[in-house]
């Protein structure tokens, strides 16, 4: 039995959660900064860091209140150590260190990508993975294809060479005049469009498991926009070509991006004899991705509930549960790891 | 017992103060290692003084101006500590700490400085009234030449003054500008002074008024603050 407080501030959500046994959600609080960043069309790091400093204390207090627990009932405190925005990560890490030091509770620094994977374990009843599994982590900051042979044992098969899938959604959304974040807004707009209206490139048709989305983004830009006279402040003018259907462009872009994700993920699962495919991260909320991967793979496909696809702290505490049970305790002197590939995590199997 | 933390600049400072006496005070150049060094330094200080974490009943933190990253580390860590101990958190302006470290009795005007990187400095003017340095201007971002040329009348300069600053201010003195550079021992910003200022606030008002959630860093932008 473990009761773990998770804290997550790696990007633009300030989050805290209390998780029992890595599986049962006692509380799950997320303060989103979407409204703050919408005006920039993406996450503005300094704005994100400032918002975390203001939100962290109320968010953690709310998580404990919702769980009806005091700090002394906790077995451990888990915090996202990386990867992510360094200024944002440091807020959660510093807060967690202060909390751990004063309460005497063990502290664990958790990999954000591992957290996304463990959002799949936050199910009732618990559904254990049938290892080996191939995991596709797709979000605004990450696109990673991972072979998981057991708890805590990861082999990175590939990842994006340029933009993350969610980042491509955001950038194309901005081009099409859709609000931030791009993912849900493109999906909604695409419902009224024809996915074969434009033939966008399916990016990196090779035998690797790497992705590339910047070519796709450029193709959309070239196809649907034209440059217009510079604005009053000299800003580059880009406007949609006349007659362009935003719905068709959104549907065609989404189809191209999902094709690339599905092809590599399914091929990876076949290559490594995986028993299951797991999806995680914000883009795993995409309905087309979910449907298409299920229809293509001759394997069980699982993904988290919608509210656990985007960044949250429940997944951080869930990942910490396995590490805590295996005896991991981190020093309060640990450094932030803004770049922290899963392949650099411990390869020693963790006892589940 | 109050724990005071200052991570506003490249130095790191911490102090333990029981309201009557300063029990421990440490200051060292931490550069960009605040996140790595802060929590273990606090743990070591508590152990050295045989003070248990749970006996800390109040926390104080320097809220800036200063390095944005340094401030966030200190403020977030202090919030976590205050949360764990159900204790008040008092945020104190970094320039006020620098000013309060200089004894009165000499000139009745003082300018406190905090390094703002790339040769710039955030300054604020103070005057000595009723036994303490009280702010008599807003904070502003300037450079050493800008600071020297803004002095009207005699003034003590204190706080973060780097080698270039000492040189520029010495030039200004030679040109007859009536400034006094505070001795190095007074220029060092001290967490013990931060603790003193925090205790003064705690005595003046009930601790319920110091909600940790309300403490936010002071971010200095160019121009007006």
Image (spheres, coloured by chain):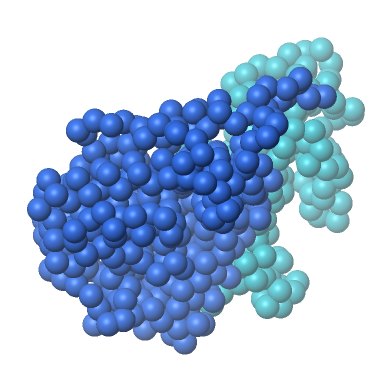
**Percent x, y for residue A132?**
12, 58
Quarter of the view holding residue A236? top right
Q: Can you say which quadrant of the picture contains the N terminus of chain A?
A: bottom left
Quarter of the view holding residue B40? bottom left
Q: Can you say which quadrant of the picture contains the C terminus of chain A?
A: bottom left
| Residue A27 seen in the current view | yes
Q: A216 or A19, which lies in front? A: A216
**Percent x, y for residue B98?**
67, 44
Chain B appears what colour? Answer: cyan
| Residue B45 seen in the current view | no
**Percent x, y for residue B122?**
71, 35
Q: Residue at x 63, y 41 (%)?
A: A245
- Chain letter, blue in picture: A
Identify whether B28 is placed above or below A297.
above
**Percent x, y for residue A197?**
51, 39
Identify whether B155 is placed above or below A71.
above
């Amino acid at each position: 039995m473990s009761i773990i407080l998770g804290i997550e501030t790696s990007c633009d959500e300030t989050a805290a959660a209390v998780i029992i046994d890595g599986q049962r959600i006692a509380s799950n609080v997320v303060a989103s900064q979407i409204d703050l960043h919408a005006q920039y069309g993406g996450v503005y790091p300094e704005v994100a860091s400032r918002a975390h400093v203001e939100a962290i204390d109320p968010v953690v207090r709310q998580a404990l209140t919702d769980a009806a627990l005091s700090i002394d009932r906790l077995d451990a405190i888990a915090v996202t150590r990386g990867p992510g925005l360094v200024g944002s990560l440091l807020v959660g890490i510093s807060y967690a260190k202060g909390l751990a030091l004063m309460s005497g509770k063990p502290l664990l620094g958790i990999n954000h990508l591992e957290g996304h994977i463990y959002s799949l374990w936050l199910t009732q009843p618990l559904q254990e993975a049938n290892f080996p599994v191939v995991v596709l982590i797709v979000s605004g900051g990450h696109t990673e294809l991972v072979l998981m042979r057991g708890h805590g044992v990861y082999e990175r098969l590939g990842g994006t060479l340029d933009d993350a899938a969610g980042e491509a959604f955001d950038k194309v959304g901005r081009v099409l005049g859709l609000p931030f974040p791009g993912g849900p807004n493109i999906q909604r707009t695409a419902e009224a469009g024809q996915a074969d209206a434009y033939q966008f490139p399916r990016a990196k048709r090779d035998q690797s498991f790497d992705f590339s989305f910047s070519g796709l983004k450029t193709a959309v830009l070239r196809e649907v926009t034209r440059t217009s006279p510079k604005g009053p402040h000299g800003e580059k003018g880009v406007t949609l070509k006349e007659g362009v259907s935003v719905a068709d462009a959104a549907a065609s872009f989404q189809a191209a991006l999902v094709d690339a994700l599905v092809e590599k993920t399914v091929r990876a699962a076949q290559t490594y004899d995986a028993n299951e495919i797991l999806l995680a991260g914000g883009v795993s909320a995409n309905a087309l991705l979910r449907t298409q991967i299920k229809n293509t793979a001759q394997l069980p496909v699982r993904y988290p509930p919608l509210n656990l696809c985007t960044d949250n702290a429940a997944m951080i505490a869930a990942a910490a549960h396995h590490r805590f049970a295996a005896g991991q305790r981190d020093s309060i002197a640990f450094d932030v790891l803004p770049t922290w590939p899963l392949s650099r995590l411990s390869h020693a199997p963790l006892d589940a | 017992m109050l724990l005071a933390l200052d991570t506003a600049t490249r130095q790191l400072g911490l102090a333990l103060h029981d309201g009557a006496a300063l029990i421990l005070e440490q200051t060292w150049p931490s550069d960009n290692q605040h996140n790595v060094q802060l929590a273990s330094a606090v743990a070591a200080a508590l152990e050295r003084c045989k003070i248990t974490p749970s006996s800390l009943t109040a926390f104080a933190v320097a809220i800036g101006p200063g390095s944005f990253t340094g401030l966030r580390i200190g403020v977030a860590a202090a919030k976590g500590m205050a949360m764990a101990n159900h204790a008040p958190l008092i945020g104190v302006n970094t320039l006020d700490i620098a000013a309060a470290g200089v004894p009165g009795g000499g000139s009745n005007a003082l300018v406190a400085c905090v390094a703002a990187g790339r040769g710039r400095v955030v300054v604020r003017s103070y005057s000595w009234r009723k036994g303490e340095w009280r702010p008599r201007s807003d904070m502003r971002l300037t450079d050493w030449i800008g600071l020297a040329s803004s002095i009207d009348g005699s003034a003590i300069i204190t706080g973060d003054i780097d080698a270039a600053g000492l040189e520029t201010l010495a030039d200004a003195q030679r040109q007859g500008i009536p400034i006094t550079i505070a001795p190095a021992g007074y220029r060092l910003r001290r967490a013990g002074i931060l603790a003193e200022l925090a205790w003064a606030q705690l005595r003046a008002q009930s601790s319920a008024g110091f909600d940790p959630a309300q403490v936010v860093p002071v971010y200095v932008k160019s121009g007006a603050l």
